[in-house]
Structure formats: structure tokens, C-alpha cells
Image (spheres, rainbow, N blue to C red):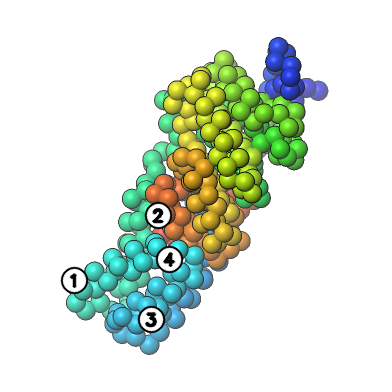
Amino acid sequence: MQQNKNCIDNIKGDRTAKPVFFFCPAPSFFIYICTLMQTDEILNKGLEKTKKGLFSRLSRAVLGRSKVDDQVLDDLEEALIASDVGVDTTLRIIDRIEERVRRDKYVNTEELNKYLKEEIEALLMENEATNQVIPFDFSKKPFVVLVVGVNGVGKTTTIGKLAAQLKAAGKKVMLGAADTFRAAAIEQLTIWSERAGVLLVKQAMGSDPAAVAYDSLASAISRDMDVLLIDTAGRLHNKVNLMNELSKIRKVLQKLIPDAPHEVLLILDGSTGQNAYQQAKEFAKATDVTALAVTKLDGTAKGGVVIGISDMLQVPVKFIGLGEGIDDLQVFDKKAFVATLFE
């Protein structure tokens, strides 16, 4: 049967070949579990280690103290840095709390958690994303998302989950396999396209990534797609090559749609802590990152990276990964995130 072959295969060099399309309808049970509505249960379970780590450090910071003084603030600073919130972001938070302590004169340690919660939420609000269920602007059609990130952060898996959720939400979705340097990336994206029942544009391994991106967008336009998700190579060993490759992809996309890509989504592995900060800096130098997705938060106590990296890059976190399931990729809700940390 051909129903599982929903790919567009353009073999390198054969630019005259007409692609053949196959649709694989998503099974009903798959649609049933696909949801972007963030739930308390998923958040509580996914952030359990981060919450325990943060609160154990905060408890030590105020142990035996009745009011907030310089020593408490110093200990709080250490606790936030140890939770991978990042030095610069931590200092911003501490400065704001110090100002409130000076203004309010006497602040007890019970009020400190309230201040901290409010300041973290305020930081996240400064880089606020849209409050749509799926934070993309569907008035732009197709809405083009260029997905970047190093190998191993869950980039291709995130694309697959997002495609499945978009399809379940009634959107026409296409994937572009522009990571042509790893056969596994193309194979993995093929599997996800079949599971989600969405179209995939791919070429042979070693093909020009920009050519794949161009073909993907041309196909998405011709087939009236709502969303195009383009996978890219995740190599950081040569920043110049990475920058040139992403720049070339952007230029060819803009030949078809002048303001494409509409989103550059950087995928980061939250469990890597400080390494995620370095990756974010490198990709921000290579391309114009407009949004973040932080994965693998369920297996780590380093969830503070969500706060710090968003603050460092001044871009919103739009998705967080809290487990292996399709519905464990969540649209980021800053208020629910902070509330869960401080429950």
C-alpha cells in the first residue's frame, strides 16, 4: 500500500522530475492524544526535578532567618545561579528584589518567594509570545518556520510532534528535510511525517540544503499549505559554515516569499544547563532567532534555563518539552510555568 509514502522525493540533479504526493491520514487515536492545552498534571510531573532543586536551595537560603537581609539575598543569588537561571539574569532578579526590600523596609522571608515569583514572571512577560493556542500567525500562508539547533537536542522530534499537533488542529502541514548531512535525520523526519499524516519534501543525502528548502516552500505554496516546518543541520563545529548555510536558506526562501522565514525556532536541550546558553549564543550570532523551544525538561533539575536564555536573547519561549509523548510538547504558558515552580 502507498498510504504510508507521503513524501516528495526529489533526487539531486533531476530538477525536471515531477514529485508524487501521497497522503497518510493520521489515525484517530493519534489525533485524540494530540493537544496543545497545557495541563497542571503535565507541568507538575515534567517540572518536578526543577521544582525540588529550586525549593531545596531557596529553603537553605532562608533557613533560620526571620527577615531578608544582605546574606539572604547573597544566598538567594547562589541558589538561582545553581538552578541554571544564568548569572546575568540572576543579577537582574536580585537587583529588582533589593529595590523592593529597600522600598518596603521590612520584608520577611515568607514574602521573599512571592517577590521572586513576581519578578521571574515579569522577566518572562518582557519577551512574551502570543497567547494563541498555537503561537503562529496563520494569516501568513504558508507560515514558514526554520528550525535550528545542534544535533541531539530533540530538533527533529520536536518538528514531528509539532506537525502532529498542527495537523490535529486542522492545519495543512508540510515538512522540509533540509538537514541533508545526516541520513538519520531524513529517515526520522520521514517516520514522523508518516505518523502525523503530513507531507514531506526531501532529497538524497548530501543534497544542497537550500535547494531542499526552496523546493519545500515552492511545494507548500502550490499545495496551499498553512504551515511549512523546515529542518536544518545541527553542526556547530564551524560557525562560519553554519552562518553561510542558514543565510543561503533564508535568501532562497525570500525569492518566493519576501518575509520568509516567518519564525526561526531554536531548539535547546534544557538538561544541558550552561551548554544550552553557549549554543543559544552561537546560533544567535549565526541567524536571527525569533523563538525558543526548550526540550527534555522532565529529566532535569536545570529548568532555570527557560528563564535565563529567554532573558539573554530577548526572545520568547514558545514551546517546552516535558516528556516523550506527543502531548508533552507544550505551548509555553509563563504564568502556569512560574506557578508550578512555586507551588
Mark drawn on residue 103: 1
Q: Residue furthest right?
A: 1
The residues bearing labels 3 and 1 have C-alpha atoms spaced at a distance of: 20 Å
Report the residue marked by disc 2.
311
* Residue 87, picture quadrant: bottom left
Circle 3 — which element? helix
Which residue is label 3 attached to?
A: 62
Task: List x then y, in percent, for residue 174.
Answer: 60, 27
Q: Quadrant of the C terminus?
A: bottom left
Nearer the observer: mark 1 or 2; the answer is 2
Q: Earlier in the sequence, mark 4 or mark 2?
A: 4
Q: Quadrant of residue 116?
A: bottom left
- The residue that appears at 46% across and 69% down in the rendered structure is 81
Label 2, label 3: how far apart the Cα atoms are: 26 Å
User: What is the CA distance from the residue labelled 4 to the residue labelled 1?
Assistant: 24 Å
Report, in whole angstroms, how far the alpha carbon at label 4 lies from the one at label 2. Answer: 11 Å
Q: Is residue 87 left or right of residue 242?
A: left
**Amino acid beneath label 2:** Asp
Q: Which residue is mark 4?
A: 87
Residue 95, position as x, y percentages in the image: 30, 67
Is the residue 204 above or below the residue 148 in the image?
A: above
Q: Specify the amino acid type for callout 3.
A: Val
